[in-house]
Image: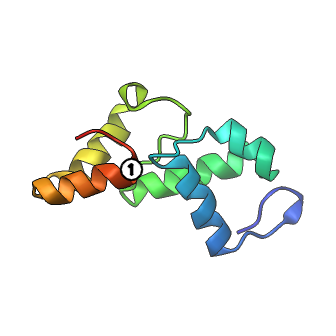
Amino acid sequence: MTGKNGLRYSQEQKEAITKRMMPPNNESVTKISKEEGISDVTLYKWRKEARAAGIATPGNGQTSDKWSSQDKFLIVMETFAMNESELAEYCRKKGALP
């Protein structure tokens, strides 16, 4: 992956940054861009790729009640077949309430 200034990002870096955009962190693209020196264009691209892969990545720094319909739908798709115990574990990992 090549970012601004021709920098290349490893798959590990990309995954770590993308994870920051996911629940429970849900860090904003702007915040990550400033902290990491990665262009917001690159981060939006990574977020779009993660969403296309079916991963909820709000990345807007807002609470779950402000997430996009797409992100809410992806969470439902991830959890619909879970039993109560699995759902509780999922919610603990994501920092959400069932």
Residue sitting at x 45%, y 46% = 24
- Left or right placement of residue 76 versus residue 81 in this view: right
Q: What residue occupies the far top of the structure in this picture?
A: 66
Total residue callouts:
1
Quarter in which the C terminus is drawn:
top left
- Left or right placement of residue 10 versus residue 21 in this view: right
Quarter in which the N terminus is drawn:
bottom right
Task: Give residue 86's position: percent from left, percent from top.
Answer: 19, 60
Q: What residue occupies the far right of the structure in this picture?
A: 5
10 Å neighbourhood of mark 1: few (<14), some, or many (≥20)?
A: some
Helix, strand or loop for disc 1: helix
- Left or right placement of residue 55 versus residue 87 in this view: right
Indicate the quadrant where residue 12 lies.
bottom right
- Left or right placement of residue 86 versus residue 96 in this view: left
Residue sitting at x 26%, y 57% = 89
Looking at the rendered structure, the kind of residue marked 1 is: Lys
Indicate the quadrant where residue 17 lies.
bottom right
Task: Give residue 95's position: percent from left, percent from top.
Answer: 39, 45
Nearest the eye: 53 or 60: 60
Task: Give residue 29's position: percent from left, percent from top.
Answer: 64, 41
Q: Is residue 60 above or below residue 80?
A: above
- Residue that badge 1 annotates: 94
Task: Give residue 5's position: percent from left, percent from top.
Answer: 89, 59
Residue sitting at x 60%, y 52% = 45
Colour logic: rainbow
